[in-house]
Every structure is written in C-alpha cells, then in structure tokens.
Amino acid sequence: MILVLKQDITREHIDALCETLESRYKVKTNPIYGKEQTIVGLVGDTSRVPEEEISNFDSVERVVKVQEPFKRANRKFHPDNTVLNVNGVEIGGQKVVLCAGPCAVENQQMITEIAAGVKEAGAVLLRGGAFKPRTSPYAFQGLRAEGLHYLKEARDCTGLPIVSEITNPSQIDLFMEYVDIIQVGARNMQNFELLKELGRHKRPILLKRGFSNSINELLMSAEYIMSEGNPNVILCERGIRTFETATRNTLDLSAIPVLKAKTHLPVFVDPSHASGFASYVEPLALAAIAVGADGLEIEVHNCPKCALSDGPQQLLPEQFAGLVKKARAVAESIGRSL
C-alpha cells in the first residue's frame, strides 16, 4: 500500500504520520522524497490498514494499493530511479557503466595488467572472481582470499572499485574488507539466508538472475536484501536456460525494459555469460545499451586461451577497447553517455 502525500506537507508532519501508522497498524513505513511527490510505502500485513480511514488523513492525497509481492523494489514505492554512488562511480544515472575484468583472478600480475588495460579503454569498475562456484568439483575454484588481496592491489594501482562474487555467508567479513560491490551469482540468487545476511549491511549488491528464474523471482530476491535494510541493489540479466544450444544461455533482452518499468533499481547486463562466446559479446552488449541497460559486465583476459575458467567467452583487451568505442556511439544515440 502506498500513501501519496499532499505537496505542502512538511517533514515534521511526515514523521508524525509514519509514527502513527507504525504504532496503530503495526506496519513498517518507507517515506520516499521524490522530485515532484512524496509518498509513504507501507510494508507488512497491510490487510489490517483501513483504506478509507487513512484516506481521510489531512496529509494524504490518495491511497494506492500495490498488488505485486515485492514492495521496496517496486517503482510504485520509489518513482525516481535509484542512483548509487560507489567510490565516485554513479550507477543508475545518465551514464552507462562499464565493468570489466577476468572471469577469475589467476595471479597478481595478470589482474593488475588487465585492470590497467580496461581502465584505459573506459571501464570504471573492475570485476574478478576469487571464489568460483563451478559445475565440476575438479574445475578451478579460484584463489579465494588471496585473489581478493590481488584485486585490492589492482584497485590501489588503478582506482577502480572492485566487483567480486560471494558464495557463502561466512565470507561476508572478508568481502567487507576488500570488495566495493558484492556480486551474488546466478546459482545463489535464491540463497535466502545469504541474501538476508547481505541485507544487514549497506555494501552495494550486484544480484544476478538465476538461469531458470522469472523476473518476478529476481525482484523477490532483491526484496530479501532490501527488507533487511540494504537498499543498494543492482540487478543483472545474464542469460537464462532455454532449449537453444547455439549459445551458453539465451540473453533475455526483453527483461531490461520490463525491469525498468517494474523497479527503480539499476539494471546491468552480462553478455559474456549469456553468450559463452567472445564473438557474440559485442553485438549483445550494444543491444543491451539500446534497450536501456544501466551497465555492462564484460569478461576480459590478456590470454583467453590460457584462462583457467571460461576462456572462450573472454575478450582480449584490444577487443574490449573496440567494443567501448561502439558502445559510446550507441549510448549517445539514445541520449546517454559512457
């Protein structure tokens, strides 16, 4: 349930209204101060809130019922786009954000060299896996804490904020020390205990859609994080599992405009995991910008043939630089920039 407030309402009146609603109806209130309107979202069991009664409150212009199960992630609760600031990088604003780096951190020299290369080309975030959930138990599982340390050294050299994937709640303290944006991978999208624990911190979360999950299920996973108090969530479309075998997954480009309509949260696209092949990454990346993505997460490696994980889908640094030039032109054609 959403209360749209009258335009001349003061902060003092809003605070008093929220206090009344919480004490009288045992719900949580979420005031949102928009550019043109202020609203108060009610979260919890709103069945006990009498719509007619609160419609008559002096400060309330109208009451809107929200049918969707996700509340805090809902654009009705937060009409303006959420814009996150991560160490000076704005995510969700006018600029399309480029996040690039290897699938996995393999050693100190490679991550430092790749970080410098992607920054020079135009990336503003550095991705790299230290804890790698793999289908096979015999595949490279990442350097773990050592990998995070190498990422930090690369950040110290380049200034690029770090994006890396968490796999277990026990790793949270370590990630709070080293990582600027914590990625929750597709396999953990519905690991609700992990999501709730991450929600108890304010560190931005990049939440990837599971390969067999619906858009609403992705939004409900975001709701788990936000319901615990962390509003800093970035959604990421990375391809879903279909009958098609020509690509690793099927990139659901339609999810981007749907998400932008349903939620105020920033939306990224990962064309590397979606395609599984480096040759398809550029056209998918350009298409993602065209349909409204706020950012791209792209895998880059200085020797993909030698990569310890997902080599076929990783771009060479010079290929990434070429993609950035085309991406800039696409962004400018729709009134955005890189």
Image (cartoon, rainbow, N blue to C red):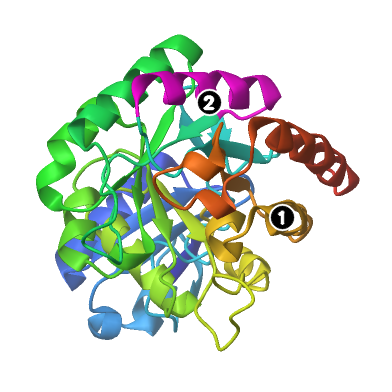
Please name whichever residue, 299 or 16, is drawn nearer the observer in this view of the structure.
299
Please name whichever residue, 323 or 40, is drawn nearer the observer in this view of the structure.
323
Image disc number at residue 114: 2
Other residues around mark 2 within 10 Å, as few (<14) / some (14–19) / many (≥20): many
Q: Amino acid at mark 2?
A: Ile
Q: Amino acid at mark 1?
A: Ser
Secondary structure, mark 2, is helix
Please name whichever residue, 24 or 75, is drawn nearer the observer in this view of the structure.
75
Q: Please provide the residue range marked out in magenta.
A: 107-124
Q: Is residue 224 visible?
A: yes
> Magenta span: helix, strand or loop, mainly?
helix
- Give me the residue at 69% from left, 37% from top: 320
Q: Note whether 193 is above or below 46 in the view shown.
A: above
Is 253 left or right of 160, judged from the image as shown? right
Determine if the magenta segment contains residue 168: no
- The residue that label 1 is drawn on is 279
